[in-house]
């Protein structure tokens, strides 16, 4: 019989030579790590970080440090908290073809596990790149079907990406890695219900993926048996989680030019702390505001053409989306986001504060929002956003923007974003030191150096 997908991936990861990782791919991975760490530090200022930390501290303790906070947790709980910090502001990168946040699960998993085993920076970087790569490829294979079927792809495919990354860092054999992927199949979870009401559980999804990946690897290392047909079996990842959309899956994407073409380098960095489905709209609205010097008082109505998969994320239920009652609800509210973009010309962390999303003027403008399905959205190849503003004098202003997976974002913007996020909680000197260490990650003798720098202890 031909080898299963899990067997082929296990062999690839176990046998991968770090010298096969091109320098530009290494650099992109380091940029993703840096971006993730800056977001994690900024997240520590928000209530969800404190509450999550307190809850996990009430469980078993341990020796693993956490980003930007004092105290230590058990290995899996530290992965959970660190991942929640990276994803909690929805400011983390997205691999658009698969609708997957890659770094949110992989980076904290590899970083926390590297501290646990005392891995060097090169091993950390290679494991991270492999995890990011498989997260992208699994997402691409789903071809948008996870989201359409109500699952959060970040959590579902992240479980397997973290399993492979953790297995590499732990030095599992190909046989053990095959078992680990099968074990991970029973741990994958995460659905899109929290986007309906702005509740918090989506923030936990990457942490669930990371903790599951670590657990699967430790079980496999001891000889626990998992199914080999983790991906293509009757109840494997793709047939089971994609359901009726399995017919559209592209399983060839998992292995196509594997090791020659690095798919995760197409990952988009976020410049807005909001659902990526909103970014093209925000770009369009900001451009309209700048070009036409729109005054909010002159706006009669705001209309948008929205891709069908984005509707349950950012516009429905419409009454709820028009009046977000939490920072998280604000991040998934297109009516509110457009109100901010048209009024303030921006959407940043300040717009996640209660005094902003409860501001009467913004709420009044958000209430003028309507939408229809976009007849030509281009999803999942790219994200489109068309905004039509009708003014009280009868003018109709229209702007359409497309956000592509390969949309270039200059390194200065990434570094500026990191500095802004990191210095919201640490000194400029410490932020600069973190950046220096990450950009020279392959030279680090022990990952514990970086984790200690990130900790608030």
Image: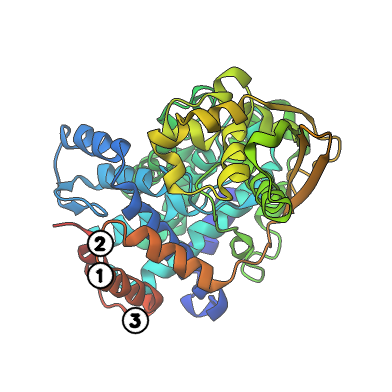
Name the residue: 48% across, 44% down: 90
Residue 426: which disc? 2
User: Foreground residue, 64 or 368?
Assistant: 368
Left/right placement of residue 226 relative to residue 451 reads right
Drawn side of residue 121 relative to residue 188, left or right = left
Question: Residues at badges 1 and 2 in contact (C-beta under 8 Å)?
Answer: yes
Structural distance between the alpha carbons of marks 1 and 2 = 6 Å
Q: Is 440 located above or below residue 296 in the figure?
A: below
Residue at the (73%, 40%) spot, across then down: 249
Which numbered dot is residue 430?
1
Q: Which mark is residue 443?
A: 3
Query: Neighbour class for label 3 at 10 Å: few (<14), some, many (≥20)?
Result: few
Q: Residues within 10 Å of mark 1 (few under 14, many from 20)?
A: some
Vertical comparison of 270 with 375: above or below: below
> For residue 136, which numbered disc appears in the image?
none
The spot of residue 101 in percent (x, y) is 53, 48
């Amino acid at each position: 019989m031909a080898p299963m997908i899990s067997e082929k991936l296990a062999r690839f990861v176990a046998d991968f030579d770090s010298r096969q990782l091109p320098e530009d791919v290494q650099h992109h991975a380091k940029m993703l790590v840096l971006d993730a760490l800056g977001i994690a530090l900024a997240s520590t200022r928000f209530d969800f970080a404190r509450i999550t930390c307190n809850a996990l501290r009430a469980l078993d303790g341990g020796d693993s440090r956490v980003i930007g906070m004092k105290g230590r947790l058990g290995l899996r709980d530290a992965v959970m908290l660190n991942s929640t910090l990276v994803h909690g502001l929805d400011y983390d990168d997205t691999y658009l073809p698969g609708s997957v946040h890659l770094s949110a699960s992989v980076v904290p998993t590899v970083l926390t596990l590297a501290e646990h085993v005392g891995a060097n920076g090169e091993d950390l970087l290679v494991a991270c790149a492999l995890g990011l790569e498989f997260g992208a490829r699994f997402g691409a294979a789903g071809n948008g079907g996870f989201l359409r079927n109500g699952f959060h792809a970040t959590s579902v495919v992240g479980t397997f990406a973290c399993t492979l990354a953790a297995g590499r860092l732990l030095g599992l054999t190909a046989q053990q890695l095959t078992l680990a992927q099968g074990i991970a199949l029973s741990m994958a979870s995460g659905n899109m219900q929290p986007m309906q009401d702005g509740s918090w559980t989506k923030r936990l999804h990457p942490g669930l993926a990371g903790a599951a990946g670590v657990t699967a690897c430790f079980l496999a290392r001891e000889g626990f048996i998992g199914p080999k047909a983790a991906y293509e079996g009757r109840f494997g990842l793709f047939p089971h989680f994609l359901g009726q959309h399995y017919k559209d899956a592209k399983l060839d994407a998992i292995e196509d030019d594997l090791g020659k073409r690095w798919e995760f380098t197409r990952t988009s960095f976020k410049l807005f702390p909001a659902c990526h489905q909103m970014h093209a709209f925000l770009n369009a609205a900001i451009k309209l505001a700048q070009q036409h010097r729109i005054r909010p008082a002159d706006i009669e109505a705001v209309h948008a053409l929205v891709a069908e998969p984005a509707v349950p994320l950012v516009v429905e239920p419409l009454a709820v989306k028009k009046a977000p009652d939490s920072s998280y609800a604000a991040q998934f509210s297109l009516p509110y986001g457009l109100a901010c973009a048209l009024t303030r010309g921006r959407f940043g962390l300040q717009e996640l504060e209660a005094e902003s999303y409860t501001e009467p003027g913004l709420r009044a403008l958000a209430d003028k929002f309507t939408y229809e399905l976009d007849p030509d959205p281009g999803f999942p190849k790219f994200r489109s956003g068309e905004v039509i503003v009708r003014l009280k004098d009868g003018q109709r202003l229209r702007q359409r923007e497309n956000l592509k997976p390969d949309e270039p974002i200059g390194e200065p913007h990434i570094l500026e974003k990191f500095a802004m996020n990191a210095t919201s909680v640490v000194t400029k000197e410490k932020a600069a030191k973190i950046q220096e260490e990450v950009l020279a990650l392959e030279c680090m003798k022990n990952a514990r150096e970086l984790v200690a720098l990130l900790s608030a202890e």
